[in-house]
Image: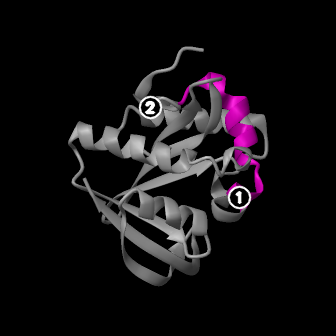
Amino acid sequence: MCMDVLNKSERLSIVLVNKDMAYDIWQNSLDEDNRRFVPDEVFESLKEAKGVIQFIIDSYQTNDGPFIYAVIRNSDNANLGYVQLVKIDKGWEIGYHIAKKYTKNGYATEAVFLFLEYLKNKGQLKEIYGIALSANAASKKVLQKCGFEPFFEGMGIYQGKRRKIIKTIKRL
């Protein structure tokens, strides 16, 4: 499989999403953590995943995104999840998800570091926001390890519902 690499480390690569990833993206979306924390990113069928992949590919040609990239393990080309950059009212928000079967290996933190390095090298952003559910201890830990500083914790809108969240910021 040919992949357009944005950034890589010894273990991971951040790459453009392509149509060959449909099955893996569909399967990764179905895990219980994805259903709990980002239910709008669950694809109930392979056909639905393929439609979203085409939307992602098309978004690469815009200035507004969202810009979503696959996280690939170099040793076996396993698709572990994604990192993304989404436009919000105040600027840009980072998002990420590593499929449950790959968690507890430091992949999320490493992928976010790689993605932040890529964004910093592009030089187009001065800051990026990270928003997580307060109950999502793993996501909060990733943000902290990657140098995001909290500036709000309380009730806010998350996935269209009023929930307890934490908002963080990282200066690039």
Q: Which of pointers 2 and 1 indicates the residue nearer the eye?
A: 2
Q: Residue 45 location, x and y as percent?
A: 79, 40
In this picture, is 71 found above or below 38? above
| Quarter assignment of residue 136 | bottom right
For residue 130, which numbered disc appears in the image?
none
Q: Residue 111 location, x and y as percent?
A: 48, 43
Q: Residues within 10 Å of mark 2 (few under 14, many from 20)?
A: few
- Residue 150 among magenta residues: no
Q: Earlier in the sequence, mark 2 or mark 1?
A: 2
Q: Residues within 10 Å of mark 1 (few under 14, many from 20)?
A: some
- Counting labels gives 2
| Quarter assignment of residue 139 | bottom right
Badge 1 marks a residue whose secondary structure is helix
Label the magenta part by its dominant secondary structure. helix
| Res. 128 in view | yes
Viewer-side residue, 14 vs 37: 14
- Amino acid type at circle 2 is Ser
The magenta stretch is: 17-35
Read off the residue under disc 2: 9
- Amino acid type at circle 1 is Asp
Q: CA distance from mark 2 to mark 1?
A: 25 Å
Read off the residue under disc 1: 33
